[in-house]
Amino acid sequence: MKKTITATLLLILAQTTCISAQTSPGNFERFRQEKTEEFMKWRQEKQTEFEKYRQRLNEEFADMMERSWKNYGSTAPEKRRERPEPVKPLDADNVKISQPREIPVDVVTPPERAIPDIPVTLPKVTPGRQVTYPVTFTFYHTTCGINTFDTSALSFNDLSSKSLSTAWRRLSNSGATSQLLDDCLRLREELNLCDWGFMKLIETMAAKLYPRSTDKQAFLTVFLLTQAGYDTKFAMRGNKLCPMFHPSHKIYSRPFYNLGNKDYYISGPLADTTGSLSICDLDFHSGATPIRMVMNRIPSFTSRPEAKRVYSSALWKKAPPVEVEVNPSVIEFMNDYPLLDWQLYGLSQLSAPIKSRIYQALAVIIDGMDEVEAVNTLLDYMQFGFNYMTDGEQFGYEKPFFFDENFYYPANDCEDRAILFAKLVKSLLGLDVVYLNYPRHLATAVKFSSDIKGTYVIVDGEKYFVCDPTCLHGKAGVLAAVYANSRPKVVKIAE
C-alpha cells in the first residue's frame, strides 16, 4: 500500500509540473491545492480500507482462538556441527605447498536468498526533531521513549482460551495499540534494528508496561509482532503464557516445536522449555513473515565510554596500526544472539564507525595496486592483523563472529577470518568470492579478471583461486599440502 501511495503522489506531482508551465501563478496554486486535497482524500480512503481489513482479521482471529489450542511435544535442541579448527595457523614459509592445479569440489551450495521486508507503513518521524516521551525504558544501555499507553486495555482474569480471546478482541479494538505499534516501528528505525532486535525491543517494552505479569508481557509481545506482520504464536506451559516465533533459519542449542512443517521457538524466560506445550496453532493470516535471523542491520546503541574497547592491528607490519573503537553495547547484543549456521554471519553488516575506519585505511593502502597485489595485501592483513585462537580456547564453546566482534575480542579463528576477508574483498575490490568449506577448516577462493598461477576450483565454469586468510605468508593461489587431497564444499556468497 505504501508503494502505491508513493507512486500516485509522484504521478500527481508530474501532472502538476507539466501544467505549471501553462497556467498563471494563481491558477497553478489552485490546481496544486486541488490535487493535494485529492491525494490526501485518496490516501485516507486506502488507509481506512487497510484498517478495516486488519480489524476483520483480528475479529476472526479472536473468534477462532477459543478452539485452536493443541498439545505439541518439543524436539530436542539440535547442536551445531562444530568444526575441529586448526590449533594454530599454518605457515606457508614452513609447510609443503600443493602444486598449482584444479582441485575437485564436493558440492556447490547456492547463496542465501533474501527475505523481503514486511509491507508496513512507518510512522512519520521529523529528522532532527527532539521529542520527549512520557514513558522510557532501557534497551542495551540505550534510553527508549514511547507515548503513554493505557495498560488497562489488556486484561484477562485467567489463561482460559475464552479469556484470552476476549482480551485479544478488546486490545485490537483499543485505539491506544495503534500508537504503541507506531512507537515500536519508530524505535526500530531509530535504533536500526534487525528483526531479532525488534522482537527483543518489544519484549523489553512489554516488561516495562507490565512489570508484575509475565503473562501480559507475552500476550502484548505476540499481539504487536502479529500486527506488524510477523509469524508468532501463543504457547502455554502449566500456568505460564509465553511467545513463540518462527525464524527464517535454524537456531541451534534451543528446543523447538514443529507446527505445520514450520519450526517455532519459545522466546523470553521460558526459551529453554522442553516437553509438552499447549499452543494456539492458529495463523493470523497466510504469508506472515518469519523473524529474519540474518543481522542485516547493526543497532545504533548508545556507547559506554567507560567500557570502550580499542582494536589495534599491531601485528601487521606493512602499515601503521589500524585502530577502531568498538561499542560494547553492540557486542553485548551480538553475544546474546542465537547460534546460527556459520554462513549467515557473512550476510551481516559492519557497524558504521568500524566500517568507515577500516575501509578507509585499507583503501588508501591498496590504492593503485592491481587485483592480485591488492588481494595479497588483504590476505596479509588478515593473517597478521589478528591473533589466532580457536573458539574452544577463547570461549569454551562454538562462537562464530559477527564482523564487529573481530575487532573486540583478543583473537579470532579460521572461520572468522574467511568470512571477514570475503567481505573486504567484495566491498573494496568488487571481486566475487566463494567459501571453501573443509571438514577441519574454512578458506576462500577469489575470481580474478584474468588467470594467475596457483591452485583453483571451478565454479559455474569460472576459475576461483584459493586464498587462505589463516595460512601465514600464503598468497593468492597457495594451498597448503595438508588440504591437497580434501574435497571442499563450495558455498556461494549472496551479492
Image: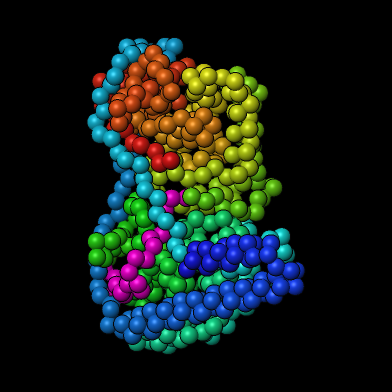
One can see residue 28 in this view: yes
Residue 376 as seen in the image, left or right of residue 66: right
Q: Quarter-wise, where is residue 436 in the image?
A: top left
Read off the magenta span.
Answer: 276-295
Q: Using the rendered view, name the quadrant where residue 32 is placed.
A: bottom right
In this rendering, the count of numbered labels is: 0
Q: Which quadrant is home to the C terminus? A: top left
209 is higher (above) or lower (below) than 350: below
Q: Is residue 284 magenta?
A: yes
- The image shows residue 94 at horizontal and vertical percentages of 42, 11
Which residue is depicted at the point 61% across and 54% down?
301
| Residue 269 seen in the figure | no
Identify the residue shown where x is 56% and y is 71%.
Answer: 182
- Label the magenta part by its dominant secondary structure: loop
What's the colour scheme? rainbow
> Which residue, as the protein is rendered here, is positioned at the far front?
22
Whether residue 353 is in magenta: the answer is no
Q: Is residue 296 above or below residue 280?
A: above
